[in-house]
Structures are given as C-alpha cells and as structure tokens.
Image: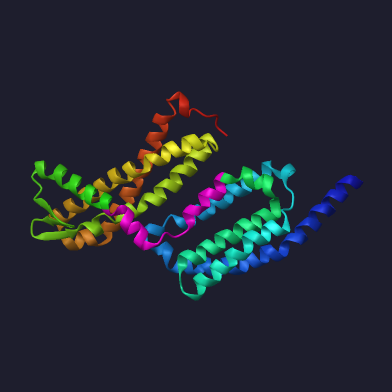
Amino acid sequence: MEASVSRVRLTTRDRLQHWPIIVGFALIALPALITLASQEWSRESGVHEPLVIATGAWLIWRDIQALKPLIRRGSPLVTAAILMPSVLIYIFGTAFDFLVLEAAGVYGAGLACTYDVVGGAVMRRLWFPLFYLIFALPAPGWVLDQATAPLKELASTVSTQLLQPFGVPVVREGVTLFIAQYQLLVEDACAGMNAILGLTSLGLFYAYLQHGASWRYCAALAVFIIPIALLANVVRIIILVLITWQFGNEAAQGYLHGTAGLVTFGTGLLLVFSLDSLLTKFRVFRVKAR
C-alpha cells in the first residue's frame, strides 16, 4: 500500500515538473492553430492537416500507454537545445507573417515538450507518429506549384487523349483545355494534385494501423502515392470536362467543382487500399499486424 502511494506521489511530482513547458507550448500552439484554421485549412491543399493533427495526437497517446515503463524525464539541456531554436523560428514566422515557419516552430516546441515529458527512449519508439505529424505542416505554395506542375500537364494530356476517341470536343493548348465554346484552365482542373500530401499522410496512417511501424512497407506505399494522385486527377479532369461540355462552365466551376474534388480524394483512397491489399501478397512486405 505504501509503495502504491509513493508511486502516485512520484507521478504527481513528475507531472508538476513538466507543467511550465506544457503551458508554454499551449500558449504558442493555440494562436498558431487559430491562424491555420482561418487560412490554411480552408484550402484544398491543407484540408488534411487538422485530420493529421488529430490522428497523430491519438497515435502518440495510444502508443505511450504501452510504453509507460520506459518513461523517464528528458535531459533539460537537450530539451533547451530543441526548444530555443524552435521558439526563435516561431517568433520570426509570427513577426513576418510566415505561416510555414510559425507552424514549424510549434512542431519543434512540441518535440521538446514530448522529450521533456517522456525521455529519449520513448521518443525513439514514437518515431512514426512524430514523423507523421510533419504532414500537418503547411507546405509553401511555390513548392507545391513547382513540384506538381509537370504532373498537372501530364494529367491534362492523358485526360484529353482518353476523351477524344469518345467524341468529346476537347483539345489542349498549353495550360488550357478547350471544350466546345468553353475553356478550362489546367491549373484549376488539376488543383487536386495538391492532395498528394493528404493521400500520403492518410496512406501512411492506414499502413501503420494495419502493419505497424515497418519503414520498408511505408516507403513502398509512399512511392506509389504520386501515380495514384495522377490517376485520381485524371478522373477529376474527365469529370470536369464532361460537366463543362454538358452543363456549361458555371456548373463546372460551382459546387460540382468541389464534388469533383471529393471524388478525386475518394478515388485516391480506394486506390491506396487496393494497393495495400496487393503489396501484402508479396512476402517482402508481409509484416505482423500491431
């Protein structure tokens, strides 16, 4: 009985030691989350980010339950070495309205807080959830544009070639698709290419739940994400072209445009699940479920 009481007291004392850094983390995280919610999460490229934060936090909480015997308070020096540059990055990002740096600073501060509470041994075991949370950081727009530009052009070319044999009056010129008397910008039609990050994060989350922290399997699945996103966007472009042809440009750019985006993401997820079933048939990718 006395041993039990002492453990409770020790746990309470340990928690009191952590509260300053936890409160400090909350003070910088909450404003950043509010900013992300009002700006980044309303865009198609960032719609997956709150889901990543929620599922990543759940993964950390779930895995820590099994790692409680390994929990030790981290070294204050290491905590400070992670926390100080993270706070500086956060301050710089906030002062100059650079949301990417602001979010990166919060992520770094979160790593410092986690290390301080659970220690290095548990942090190493939590490598996947901590890596997974990186997908919640907003990517700079120019990076997405540069990375997805060739894929957007390829997707529009494939879509045009698939539609023309069926009598659909569509031709491509540069970054514009001409459908009868209408025109559709390739940039708008392929906006779903920004869903690559969302598909990657949710695909890895699914793989982790199904197969555990197998880096080999996660890497194999991630390699196929770009072809999956490309195929899903071909479907989206075809849908938008057909809507434009039959119902006009206003219908294609209205609420049906958002519906086409949902179809794109749903198609991508179905392809990820199908790929998972296929990969598990190969011996090299067979891993024990968690």
Q: Position of residue 239 (x, y in %)?
A: 22, 50
User: Image check: 195 left or right of 153?
Assistant: right
| Location of residue 194 (image quadrant) | bottom left
214, 52: nearer the viewer? 214
Q: Residue at x 58, y 49 (%)?
A: 58
Instruction: Examine the rendered structure and indicate whether residue 271 appears above or below residue 9.
Output: above
Q: Residue at x 72, y 55 (%)?
A: 75
1, 192: nearer the viewer? 192
Instruction: Examine the rendered structure and indicate whether residue 31 appears above or below residue 55.
Output: below
User: Image check: 260 left or right of 4?
Assistant: left
Instruction: Examine the rendered structure and indicate whether residue 128 appears above or below residue 289.
Output: below
Q: Position of residue 119 (x, y in %)?
A: 70, 50
Instruction: Look at the image and say whether residue 143 sits in the magenta stretch.
Output: yes
| Location of residue 230 (image quadrant) | top left
Q: Position of residue 191 (x, y in %)?
A: 29, 56
Q: Residue at x 55, y 36 (%)?
A: 212
Magenta span covers which residues? Answer: 128-149
